Image (spheres, rainbow, N blue to C red):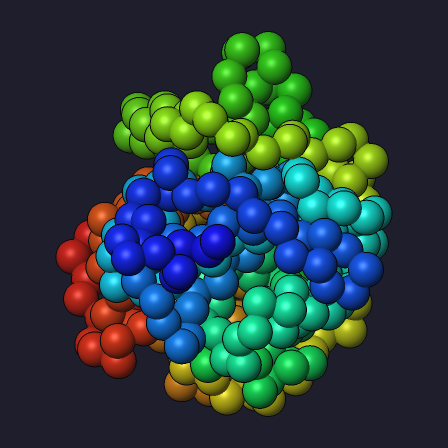
Amino acid sequence: MSSRDTDRPIRSYRDAPTRSVSAAGVNFAYRELGPESDVPVVFLVHLAANLDNWDPAVIDPIARHHHVITVDYRGVGASSGVAPVTVEAMAEDIASFIRALGHRRVDILSFSLGGMVAQALALRHPELVRKLILTGTGPAGGKGIDKVAGVTYYDMLRATLARKDPKEFLFFNRDSVGKSAASSFVHRLEERTADRDAPITIRAFQRQLTAIKRWGRSTPADLSRISQPTLIANGDHDRMVPSVLSEDLHRRIPGSQLVIYPDAGHGGIFQYHDEFTSAAIDFLADRPIRTSSAER
């Protein structure tokens, strides 16, 4: 039984059960919560992430207004199969997953690698996507994207030496504000104690890094073909996917809106989760985006 079949929809990501659906020869693990909707919001997650890596401070406010679906990529977490080595293959998987759930159109909220998958999905299957939210991400052929592996391994080493979660180094600035935001973020990810997802394997992690490197070295796509309303967000000091690439996306996607959070890194949407979720909800509702601490 899914949350849409109950009298009281699940409102907290911490309580959303893990489910499975078969599509394209894969059993995709997913979670859903929020009120029933003809156009759900599908969340596409970052490198090395499983279902447990979505911040409830981002998921829960949006799920008060929209039906939210999160999913493990092929070969990641509880999803079966072998992780793809191209972003385009991931996009085809997501298209199959969406159709297997019976949805004809969805909104997409994506972060980092998920934003690359979202772009490929919108270009390959425009009929499936109503609106796009791209955060902490960049376009195919974007300068510096092929260096993600180097930055990732370096920060993983730093985190190991400091006995910290690597995301504290990868997603946040290492100043007092960033360290505080990082600690709060990691704590929120630990709120769920039951029905935790399986961690990504080293093999799947390496295959995802290969996909990102290929994306960074590929021929730039014609992003003017993306006609869906698009919101782009990032921190102003993204070391993983350089912030200038968010500006590049904004220039190349017609009519897109850009929000840049000051004194924030790759995980700017998690550091500014209140402001970001407010902007996302306004965007999905066709209302003007209200910004306080952000620049547009």
Name the one closer to the observer, 177 or 12. 12
Q: Quadrant of residue 284?
A: bottom left
Does any portion of residue 133 appear in the rendered image? no
Above or below, comparing residue 120 to residue 26 in the picture: below
Q: Residue at x 76, y 46 (%)?
A: 80
Q: Residue at x 56, y 61 (%)?
A: 115
Q: Residue at x 26, y 80 (%)?
A: 286
Numbered-mark total = 0
Does any portion of residue 273 appear in the rendered image? yes
x and y, in percent, of residue 210 in the image: 81, 49
x and y, in percent, of residue 211 in the image: 77, 54
Q: Residue at x 61, y 14 (%)?
A: 160
x and y, in percent, of residue 90 in the image: 72, 61
Query: Is 20 left or right of 11, judged from the image as shown?
Result: right
Q: Quadrant of residue 23?
A: bottom right
Above or below, comparing residue 75 to residue 127 in the picture: above
Above or below, comparing residue 47 to residue 28 in the picture: above
x and y, in percent, of residue 31 in the image: 50, 49
| Quadrant, the C terminus | bottom left
